[in-house]
Image (cartoon, rainbow, N blue to C red):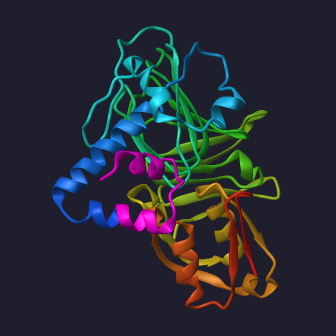
Amino acid sequence: MNKELLHTYFKGKTTPDEEKQIMDWAEASSENYSEYLQERKIWNALLVNYKQSVGSSVPTEVKNQTFNLWKIVSIAASVTLLITFSWTLLNTVSKEPEGLQAVLVPAGQRVQLVLEDGTKVWLNSNSSFTYPTSFGSKSREVELNGEGFFEVTNDPGKPFIVKTKKYDIKVLGTTFNVYAYDQEASTFETSLLSGSVDISFKDNEKNHIILKPKERVSEVNGLLHKEAIDNLDRFRWKDGLICLDDVPFETLMAKFSIYYDVIIKIENSKVLDYRCTGKFRQSDGIEYALRVIQKDLKFKYTRDDEANIIIIK
C-alpha cells in the first residue's frame, strides 16, 4: 500500500473510494493489517510533538495545524515510538509534574495511549489531550477538549482529574467516558461504567455531583442532570464504531460535523423528524454513513470540499 495514501487517510483527507481501497487492503490479510497498524501507531506517536512547562496552554495555532509527516519526521527524535498494540510514554517520577505532551487527533481518526501511571486513554476524532510526561506527587491532572474514554489506574494518594472547559472530573480508579468539545459549548456529558467520579464546576467547586456506576450526567440549560445509562454500545467509538440508538438526525449531524471536521447545513426540514438507529465504522467516512441513512430517509446532499461543507437538501 502506498504510504503517502495511508498518511492522507490518517489526516482524514481521503475520498470515500480511497477509504474503501485502504480498508479492503487492510482486511485482505493479516500481514496487511499488521502493516496498517504499524503505520498508524507511528503516525499517532508523531502527533505528540509539543512539549512545554506546566502552566502554559496549547496555542490555538497548534490545535489548527495540519500535520505534514515529512516536517514532523525532523523532530521525531524527541518522540519515543513503541510499535505495539498501544504505546506508552514513561519518565522518572518526580515530586512535581514534568513537561506537557499534547495529542491532537485528526478528523475521522482515533488515538489510544497509556499514561505513565498505567492509565489507559482513548481519544475520539478532533479531540485534543494534554498531560504531563510524569505526574506530580499530589494529583494526576490532564486536560481534554473533545471525547475521551478513561480506564484510570487506582492510586488513593493521587486523585486523577480530567479538566474540561467548564467542569473538572475527579476520580481515583475507575472507567468512564467524557464528551466535552469546546465547539459544542452547551454540550457536556460524563458517563460512569465503574468506580466513582466527582464532577464540579470550574468556577464553583462546592457545586458538584457524584456519579455511581451505570449513571451519566449531562448539562441541561446550564445545570447538571443525572440519569441511568441504558445502552453501553455508544461507548464503542473507541473500537471504531459509531453506534446509534434512536438519535435525532440533527444531533447526529452535529456529531458528524465534529468527528469529520466538516460544516453540515440542513436545508431540508423534513429530515429533522427522523431518528437514527444503527452502526457505522468511523473509518467508512461520513459519505458512506449518509448513503446508508438515505436508504431509510429521502434526502439529497451536496459536498463542497473547497468550502468544507455538506448541505442536506
Relative to 29, does residue 200 appear above or below in the rendering? above
Q: Position of residue 33 (x, y in %)?
A: 24, 55
Residue located at (40% from left, 33% from top): 45
Q: Is 38 on the left or on the right of 229, as rendered?
A: left
Q: Position of residue 181 (x, y in %)?
A: 67, 48
Residue located at (58% from left, 91% from top): 296
**Residue 48 in sight:** no
Residue located at (76% from left, 49% from top): 185
Seen from this angle, which residue lies furthest top? Answer: 95
Q: Which residues are magenta?
A: 1-22
Q: Is 156 on the left or on the right of 187, as rendered?
A: left
Relative to 257, does residue 176 appear above or below in the rendering? above
Q: Position of residue 41 (x, y in %)?
A: 34, 40
Q: Is 29 on the left or on the right of 301, as rendered?
A: left
Magenta segment includes 44: no
**Residue 131 in sight:** yes
Relative to 101, does residue 164 appear above or below in the rendering? below
Q: Is 306 on the left or on the right of 15, as rendered?
A: right
Q: Quadrant of the C terminus?
A: bottom right
What is the chief secondary structure element of the magenta stretch?
A: helix
